[in-house]
Amino acid sequence: MVYIFKNFFITWKQILKGDKWYYAWLGFLSIFIVLGIAAYVQQVNRGMIETAMRDQVSWGFYISNFTFLVGVAAAAVYLVVPAYVYNFKPIKEIVLFGELLAVTAIIMCILFILVDMGRPERVWHLLPIVGAMNFPRSLLAWDVIVLNGYLAINLIISFYVLYRTAHDKEYNMQIIKPLIIISIPWAISIHTVTAFLYNGLPSRPFWNAAVLAPRFIASALCSGPALMLIIFQIIRKVSRIDIDNRAIHKIGELIAYAMGVNLFLFAAEFFKEFYSGSVHLAPMKYLYFGLHGHANLVPWMWPALLFNITAFFLFLLPKTREHPFGLNLACILVITGVYIEKGMGLIVPGFIPGTLGEIYEYTPTMLEKVITVGIWAGGAMIYTFLLKFAMPIHTGELRFVSEASEKTE
Amino acid sequence: MEMNNKRKNCRPRKISRRGFIQGTALGLASLAIPVGSADASVWEAFFQKHFREMNDDEKKAVIKRMEKEYSERYGRDLTIKTTNAEPGVLFGYGLDLSRCIGCRRCVYACVRENNQSRDPQIHWISVLEFEKGEKWINDLEGSDKYYNPDEVPEDGFFYMPVQCQQCENPPCVRACPTQATWKEPDGIVVIDYNWCIGCRYCMAACPYGARRFNWGHPRIARSELNTETHYLGNRPRSVGVVEKCTFCIQRTRGENGRYPACVEICPVGARKFGNLLDPDSEIRYIIENKRVFRLKEDLNTFPKFYYFFAT
């Protein structure tokens, strides 16, 4: 029993102690977190009228960020498959950090949903038994289940592995293998269900297209791994962990294929809408050319498309993807491109034109932006803590104490 | 005058940096208040059950607490009914497009009857203006909700009011993750405002733009409050929940049922209301004898709201 407290203390010491750069980074994030909390308090007090959302466009920046982050979370599977299924060693060594990123992304998703709720204190109404979860009819109920399930799976896998390693013991593959196998379709499911959530609404023709879920997955397999590539390079710099270049280049190559599929599906959608030119073309027209003089998103959508196409070639050609500059440029382009395309570029046109034909241009207010940045900073802090704890365990610098370990000393 | 306000309301409020910081500071300060002033009723409200899971005693207790809360908030006594649906009744609505003159009296009668917020303004009925000879029901983009001439009807235009269509197969009910909205046995789609979490998925799901969200704290002048209310209908709402037309459930249900406020006020008699299960009702006569259609029938929502042409 005493060792539990000792190890608990070791964990906290590890998280809270660092050099001045570590504290500077935490301090930097704290500023945005505090501002975000303050802005959220204001939103709770005055109501969501402080946002730019209205009855016409009833979901906005928060749900856009949520959608993007579901993709990031799902993308951990891109590491899990080569690591565990194909036993590709260079990736197997870093899969843990992908799982921790999934954990962080899901926590951020939940925060984005919470700040978007008009009555967050009633969130327990969503639960089965104590609440009145509308399962299986409501896709939002499905989403609650798959997202929390995915969070649990990744938490269990990563913390079990960390716990065993911290005790200098090999982890038992028999225990985690079933979870890893479940986690693969589950990752696909969080994305599919989130896509279906929009997809299943015949009131919104822009979302009511069968290509939505496949495109969701294709674009998720671009943005998530690209974010991981940048994080891996940082980990390599700040810790003793050696991340094999082969792993990084392999992931880069996989992003190219996913982006290829994403661009193809986009082209299919673009063709169908513009060539057939029915009434349901309106949202697509709003996105890329503007509708009746309303064109807020046009200056975002074309660069996003350009970024995605450029990144596709940068990742596809071995010469550019194996060059540090080419690789990182491609990563940034993909993350930005998909963030626009699958964030605001997906949510807002669902509401423009509205179901009664009204056009309401939505641009997030300062308050929405501050809250959003606050959640991103919070996510960065959570991931920093997770890494601060996991990295030294991974390298063998940090170990827990137990009766056996104290005896040997 | 009110028409102009409406246009203004849909624009986001611009916040200056200074105002933002001030508001933030105020917001932080007020966080401490609810903890200090919490009394039993706050917790009772928090743990209140879903309306359909309450027994009669629990309903009575809840109504008593709410009546007290409302009288504190508005300084007036108010009654909350929970009248159930009558067997053999399925409400249906008819709207005569050949008569409607676009005067919006229905819009404001509805606001007064149903205690919609006056600031920010909430309207359950939207009247769309269409140019004659242009596209309309399948491409509503050409419609204008904010028409504002000196006099209606305008030459060369016609009007189509839209409100909750009380679908037999309501997409909003399917969407709601907490079952806070459902279809009653008499066909009215209602919301338990104390169970709604404000996720607004129903608003995304509704093909008729019928659902309204309380973006800000609703405000109604004390003198304008309608004190005859129904739990599932026109009792005052709070911030952060969705609301919608209930066919004036507080009026239409029960022994001495009255017409909805919009039917009563219509100066040209364009609005009809009745029991779809009663073969002798006016609504049945209209469906059987006039040229009727329902909005967006291709979505298979089966509205109980029939548009027709009497002349």
Image: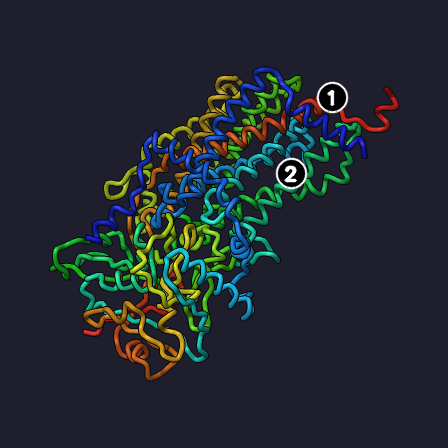
Asked whether A177 or A162 is in front, the reply is: A162
Subunit that carries the residue with mark 1:
A
Observer able to see residue A289: yes
Q: Position of residue A7 (x, y in %)?
A: 75, 29
Q: Give me the residue at 59% from left, 23% from top.
A: A232
Q: Give me the residue at 61% from left, 22% from top.
A: A246
Return the residue at label 2. Answer: A154
Subunit that carries the residue with mark 2:
A
Asked whether B25 or A65 is in front, the reply is: B25
Q: Give me the residue at 22% from left, 72% from top.
A: B269
Q: Amino acid at mark 1?
A: Gly
Residue found farthest to the top:
A20
Return the residue at label 1. Answer: A396
Q: Amino acid at mark 2?
A: Asn
Q: Quadrant of residue B294?
A: bottom left
Instruction: Identify the secondary structure beneath mark 2.
Output: helix
Q: Position of residue A254 (x, y in %)?
A: 55, 31
Observer able to see residue A264: no
